[in-house]
Amino acid sequence: MPVKDKEYDALLALLRGRSDEHGRLLDELDPAEQARGYGALVSAALLEMAEKRFIRNGKYVPGSEVVAYVAHARSMSDAFADEVDPRIAERVLFCALDQGDLDDIDARVIFETQLWLLVALVRDEQFASDAELESLLNEARQLADDVMEM
């Protein structure tokens, strides 16, 4: 089952800083659908952003840059610092870069950490236009659709 338009629109609203619209759109989704489609889209978008941020010239940046990024993200937001365990955030990013696993972490904690990291990465990226952000989400949507078809 592909990512639904409401799932896409909800994440786009969040990444544009429209948290009220994001919440409203999520409330319209069936919880099971939300867990599957929206969760896959968040994971895929985080993967896209992690690769954009932490792969240079086809190579992974040193792990210390991932650790430093998590510290940076925590310093930019009290809510991030309060809600996200830095060790888990680092592991989520390393996993997105195929450098670890998350088998021992609760799925809900992984999802929430992915969402926090995605918002931080998008804000740091400072896309020049809405079209660039939409392009990122369209790529993530295709990836999520491909994964859900497997």
Image (tube, rainbow, N blue to C red):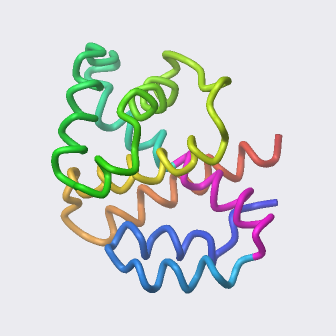
Residue 46 on the magenta span: no
Tell me what residue is drawn at x 52 percent, y 51 percent.
112
Magenta region:
30-44
Tell me what residue is drawn at x 39 percent, y 50 percent.
83
Residue 37 on the magenta span: yes
The picture quadrant where one finds residue 30 is bottom right
Tell me the quarter of the image containing the C terminus. Answer: top right
Q: Is residue 121 visible?
A: no
88 over 134 or under it: above or below: above
Give the main secondary structure of the magenta stretch: helix
Q: Position of residue 68 (x, y in %)?
A: 20, 27
- Count of numbered labels shown in the rendering: 0
In the image, taking residue 4 as reference, residue 99 lies left or right, namely left
Tell me what residue is drawn at x 74 percent, y 56 percent.
36
Q: Looking at the image, which residue sits at the far front?
A: 82
47 over 88 or under it: above or below: below
In the image, taking residue 7 as reference, residue 13 lies left or right, namely left
Tell me the quarter of the image containing the N terminus. Answer: bottom right
Q: Position of residue 116 (x, y in %)?
A: 40, 52
Tell me what residue is drawn at x 46 percent, y 31 percent.
88
